């Protein structure tokens, strides 16, 4: 039996054991339980309130109201509880000493309240819930209400457009690159993106395929962005930060929802979701959806040079001629997912979920030029066990090219069949009279990547493991010390240690200062290690060629990981009677071992090897152009190497101000600078980010159910260099408008307009000229 098959069998066997054990334990705990039910209404209008959370405080037992304001929380062990009823925009109600021995009815009325900035909590900075002012990192939070307001676009990256320190560039309808703190690229991998702990990166390229998600935007729940190196807690590729996406449990979104969107570029999106309770602690949710849209992207073959405005607009004529035109048809995706939970009733939850998406016709910007995905299938599954002390997360995902994707530069068909299997566990405990909190964990991941010889010569089977620990010591309510370290080993790279240290000083509950140090690393992707692809053709007749000689892109199996040391100071403060929040962060990074773009002559495996009688006068020219002889025939070989040391520094300022209960303002300013200390001859080390960025937002919400938001961002000019695409990005300012109206308890009407003024914007060199896209949405809930 081959190693791959054995590991898959062991992985699946462990999953089965975990499921069976959880279900058996759940049946034992489900006995002798009670139900709490009732109706929640608005105190002023006396209308029932949907989607209100009911929680038994100190436990994970709870639920939410349906479209009629009714709720039912089942599987409650007999006892005395604190019942908490909460929703954004309403005062939280807590009822103490509620005795629940048998089924019980409990109704409540909620009154509107001012926003409580001091109660915003985050999880990703320390792997535990904590007030945002106490977090030992620069953190941004996107709450469910903000996601809902912008959901019609269906584009997750847009949710982060106005956050401090964030670089977002769009190159297609669903193709975005998200980065923080410099050195963006055509396929950015410097931000680790997790959804409920599952890495969303595809195996071969290590980047995200944003149109491959299996849930609509409005069902994402909550986003957190932790900026800065984060390998001490998250391992490889948390280089510049981590995006944590948390989706809601079935009991938090009970009922049926149907959503339909239409808009410019012939955009059509339809989604349906159902979530319900099965009794005895069981709950479920399932969703299905599809989205189709036209595209701004244009063909760039020689025949298209007069028709494609992208050539003249961005100056692409010199390096953008492609051999293959774009495939006909819209950019589409179809998706579905399902989840089932079992709640033990004592802060312990087991869940199983999975999904499948099919993506078609979107473009990637890569080191070898544009690549179009004709059709790819992306299945995934996850099993999780969560309790107060122990959390276990097991997931698997794959990507399969149902039809070949194509390199437009060379016209070559490309395939990918990949699988990732991942298991991790974390355990936490308190000691020293709750002054010391300790978290320890371990993970193991297995990769299988096969490109049928189109991108790599052979299939690869690799694995990586890590163990980590973090300690938080709080001798008083004023100061907190944090120390963590992680060790990672892999068949792809040498062992890596990633330490972290932080001090958080909080002179008052609403103000905190921090100093942090972090180390992180990024592993080269499979393309950088093992790429073997045709990238184009060259005329090598002076060197003994035929005139249509191949240009190859080759990986370098001897690459080392990229490394970064980050030093930060930060401040978070709440002012004006809990109406204003300010964050100010400054950092200094030392980054080393950059993996270059594809360059000639940098890989010793393809060093210039002239045949007998080669003219000496041409040797230097041939060497500098990456000419390599195979079987006596010349070819050009471009490859990768580690070269480059860069010092980075930056300042990030964020502001949120609630004028009143209806209007709030937010804004951000980011300054970034860098200094190249060392680089490979012929490489261009640029951060692909502006020195200054500004953003702002104005949001209005009233009691009648109407809300609207106007957001804008200004990007100053900067140079771009990534792979074959190198040029100037001109300055631009974008405005986006979102609005919605809760017409009835069941009907919501809304929409978004990105690039409101329809400026023709070029955000990434090699990408498409982006215009306006207006989308309207109708959502029905039952």
Image: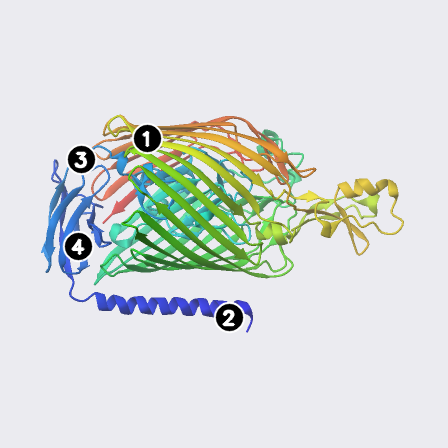
Q: Nearer the viewer, mark 2 or mark 3?
A: 2
The residue at which mark 2 appears reads as 6
Per the image, label 2 sits on a secondary structure element best described as helix
The mark that comes first in sequence, 3 or 1, is 3
Whether tag 3 and tag 4 are in contact, CB under 8 A, the answer is: no
Q: Nearer the viewer, residue 231 or 172?
A: 231
The residue at which mark 4 appears reads as 72
The residue drawn where x is 80% and y is 56% is: 631
Residue 298 visible within the image: no
Q: Nearer the viewer, mark 3 or mark 1?
A: 1
The residue at which mark 1 appears reads as 573
Residue 407, percent across and down? 61, 48
Residue 86, percent across and down? 20, 43
Give the CA separation, mark 4 to mark 2. 45 Å
Q: Nearer the viewer, mark 4 or mark 2?
A: 2
Per the image, label 3 sits on a secondary structure element best described as loop
Give the CA separation, mark 3 to mark 1. 25 Å
In the displayed structure, 402 sits above or below 130; it is below
Q: Nearer the viewer, residue 637 or 227?
A: 227
Residue 129, percent across and down? 31, 46
The residue at which mark 3 appears reads as 112
The mark that comes first in sequence, 3 or 4, is 4
Relative to 472, 240 lies left or right: right
Q: Neighbour class for label 4 at 10 Å: few (<14), some, many (≥20)? A: many
């Amino acid at each position: 039996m081959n190693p791959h098959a054995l590991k898959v069998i062991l992985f699946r066997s462990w999953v089965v054991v975990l499921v069976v054990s959880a279900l058996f334990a759940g049946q034992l705990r489900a006995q002798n339980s009670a139900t709490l039910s009732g109706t929640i209404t608005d105190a002023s209008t006396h209308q029932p309130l949907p989607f209100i959370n009911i929680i038994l405080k100190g436990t994970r037992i709870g639920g939410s109201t349906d479209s009629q304001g009714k709720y039912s929380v089942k599987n409650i062990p007999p006892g005395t509880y604190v019942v908490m009823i909460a929703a954004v925009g309403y005062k939280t109600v807590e009822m103490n000493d509620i005795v629940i021995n048998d089924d019980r009815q409990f109704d409540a009325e909620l009154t509107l309240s001012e926003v409580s900035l001091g109660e915003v909590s985050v999880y990703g900075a320390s792997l535990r819930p904590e007030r945002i002012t106490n977090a030992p990192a620069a953190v941004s939070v996107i709450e469910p209400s903000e996601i809902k307001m912008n959901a019609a676009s269906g584009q997750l990256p847009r949710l982060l457009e106005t956050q401090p320190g964030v670089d977002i560039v769009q190159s297609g309808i669903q193709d975005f690159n998200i980065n923080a703190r410099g050195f963006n690229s055509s396929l950015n991998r410097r931000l680790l993106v997790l959804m409920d702990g599952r890495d969303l990166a595809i195996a071969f390229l290590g980047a995200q395929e944003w149109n491959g998600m299996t849930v609509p935007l409005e069902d994402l729940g909550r986003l957190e962005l932790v900026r800065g190196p984060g390998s001490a807690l998250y391992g490889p590729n948390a280089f510049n930060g981590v995006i944590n996406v948390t989706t809601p449990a079935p009991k938090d979104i009970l009922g049926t929802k149907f959503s339909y969107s239409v808009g410019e570029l012939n955009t059509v999106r339809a989604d349906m979701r159902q979530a319900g309770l099965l009794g005895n602690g069981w709950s479920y949710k399932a969703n299905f959806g599809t989205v189709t849209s036209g595209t701004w992207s244009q063909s760039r073959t020689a025949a298209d040079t007069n028709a494609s405005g992208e050539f003249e607009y961005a100056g692409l004529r010199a390096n953008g001629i492609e051999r293959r035109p774009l495939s006909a048809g819209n950019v589409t995706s179809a998706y579905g997912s399902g989840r089932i939970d079992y709640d033990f009733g004592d802060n312990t939850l087991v869940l199983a979920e999975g999904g499948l998406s099919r993506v078609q016709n979107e473009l990637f910007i890569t080191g070898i030029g544009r690549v179009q995905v004709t059709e790819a299938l992306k299945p995934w599954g996850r099993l999780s066990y969560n309790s107060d002390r122990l959390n276990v997360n097991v997931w698997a995902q794959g990507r399969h090219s149902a039809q070949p994707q194509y390199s437009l530069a060379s016209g070559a068909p490309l395939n990918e069949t990949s699988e990732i299997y991942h298991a991790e566990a974390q355990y936490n405990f308190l000691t020293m009279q709750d002054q010391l909190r300790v978290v320890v964990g371990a993970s193991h991941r297995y990769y299988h990547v096969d490109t049928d010889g189109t991108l790599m010569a052979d299939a690869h089977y690799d694995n990586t493991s890590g163990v980590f620990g973090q300690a938080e010591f709080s001798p008083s309510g004023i100061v907190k010390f944090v120390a963590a370290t992680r060790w990672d080993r892999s068949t792809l790279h040498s062992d890596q240690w990633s330490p972290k240290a932080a001090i958080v000083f909080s002179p008052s509950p609403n103000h905190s200062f921090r100093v942090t140090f972090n180390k992180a690393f990024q592993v080269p992707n499979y393309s950088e290690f093992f790429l073997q692809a045709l990238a184009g053709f060259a005329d090598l007749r002076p060197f003994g060629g035929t005139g249509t000689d191949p240009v190859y892109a080759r990986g370098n199996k001897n690459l080392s990981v990229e490394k970064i040391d980050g030093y930060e100071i930060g401040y978070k403060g709440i002012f004006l009677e809990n109406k204003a929040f300010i964050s100010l962060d400054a950092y200094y990074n030392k980054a080393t071992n950059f993996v270059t773009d594809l360059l000639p002559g940098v890989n010793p495996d393809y060093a210039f090897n002239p045949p007998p009688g080669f003219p000496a006068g041409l040797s230097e020219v041939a060497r500098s152009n990456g000419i390599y002889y195979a079987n006596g025939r010349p070819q050009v070989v471009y490859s990768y190497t580690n070269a480059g040391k860069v010092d980075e520094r930056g300042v990030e300022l964020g502001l949120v101000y609630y004028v009143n209960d209806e209007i709030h303002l937010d804004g951000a300013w980011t300054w970034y600078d860098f200094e190249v200390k060392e680089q490979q001859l012929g490489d261009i080390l640029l951060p692909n980010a502006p020195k200054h960025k500004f953003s702002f937002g104005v949001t209005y919400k009233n009691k009648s159910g109407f809300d609207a938001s106007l957001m804008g961002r200004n990007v100053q000019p900067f140079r771009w260099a990534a792979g074959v695409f190198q040029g100037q990005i001109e300055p631009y300012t974008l405005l986006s408008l979102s609005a919605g109206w809760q017409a009835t308890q069941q009907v919501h009407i809304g929409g978004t307009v990105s690039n409101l003024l329809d400026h023709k914007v070029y955000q990434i060199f090699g990408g498409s000229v982006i215009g306006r896209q207006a989308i309207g949405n109708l959502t029905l809930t039952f």
